[in-house]
Image (cartoon, coloured by chain):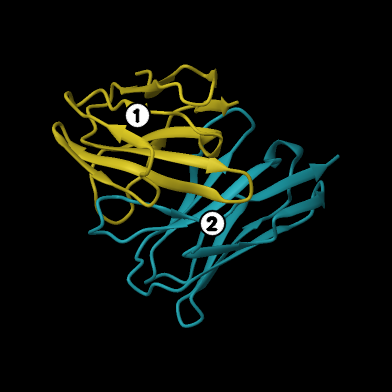
Chain colours: A cyan, B yellow
Amino acid sequence: QQQVKQSPQSLIVQKGGISIINCAYENTAFDYFPWYQQFPGKGPALLIAIRPDVSEKKEGRFTISFNKSAKQFSLHIMDSQPGDSATYFCAASISDSWGKLQFGAGTQVVVTP
Amino acid sequence: NAGVTQTPKFRILKIGQSMTLQCTQDMNHNYMYWYRQDPGMGLKLIYYSVGAGITDKGEVPNGYNVSRSTTEDFPLRLELAAPSQTSVYFCASIPLIGVGTEAFFGQGTRLTVV
């Protein structure tokens, strides 16, 4: 079963708008929550990541919000640009599990001009 | 540095054929992984290795085998290919384990079994 559940499956947003992708997990042993960005024909690349002792992390236009009690975390893309059109994956891992990542199903984001 | 390099980029196999997906990294990373990506399913871990000579199964290992004779190379072997193995395969490596370690992915191998 999917250990990390991601929604929505796809998202269309206008240029300048906000994209929001949500993820939920069950395993409270997870202690690292990265987001990966994937362009067509390419491998995933790390975008931003958070640890559960922090409720929010911001890097440029990308922000992760983390709610430990609800076991949920989300990615916000502010001022979305056409170049942000990609598939976004949330993931989770446990620090003593040899780096193995559990991925969400992915969200395809399309930013219209 | 080339990073993580996968070959081939595309391959069509007939049912029952076998092949090896190649993965090499030039970053001297000890930890390497094979994931498969299916539409709407995210990435699933097939096998991983924590160093030369050490491999272990991931979430979906059936139908695959791996070996790790050197730090650089981590090939994935498909024996008796089946249509269910049609997927995009990604190799990844991590420099060290612990909280906050970035995984570096190759560009993928798109495999179709017909």
Quadrant for the C terminus of chain B, please: top right
Whether tag 2 and tag 1 are in contact, CB under 8 A, the answer is: no
The subunit carrying tag 2 is: A
Residue B41 image position (x, y, % from top left)? 57, 51
Give how far across and how far down residue A80 sits, in percent.
73, 48
Residue at screen point 36% across, 36% down: B64
Quadrant holding the N terminus of chain B: top left
- Judge from the rendering whether residue B109 lies leftward or rightward of residue B73; answer left or right: right
Circle 2 residue: A104
**Under tag 2, what secondary structure?**
loop
Picture layout, residue B2 above or below residue B46 = above
Label 1 residue SS: strand
- Give the residue at the far front of this rendering: B16
Mark 1 belongs to chain: B
Instruction: Name the kind of residue labelled 2 in the image.
Output: Gly
Res B58 label: none
- Residue B76: give its label: 1
Marks 2 and 1 sit apart, C-alpha to C-alpha, by 23 Å
Q: Which mark is in front, 2 or 1?
A: 1
Instruction: Give the residue at x 71% y 40%.
Output: A85
Q: Is residue B24 above or below residue A59?
A: above
Q: What residue is rendered at 58% in x and 27% in y?
A: B112
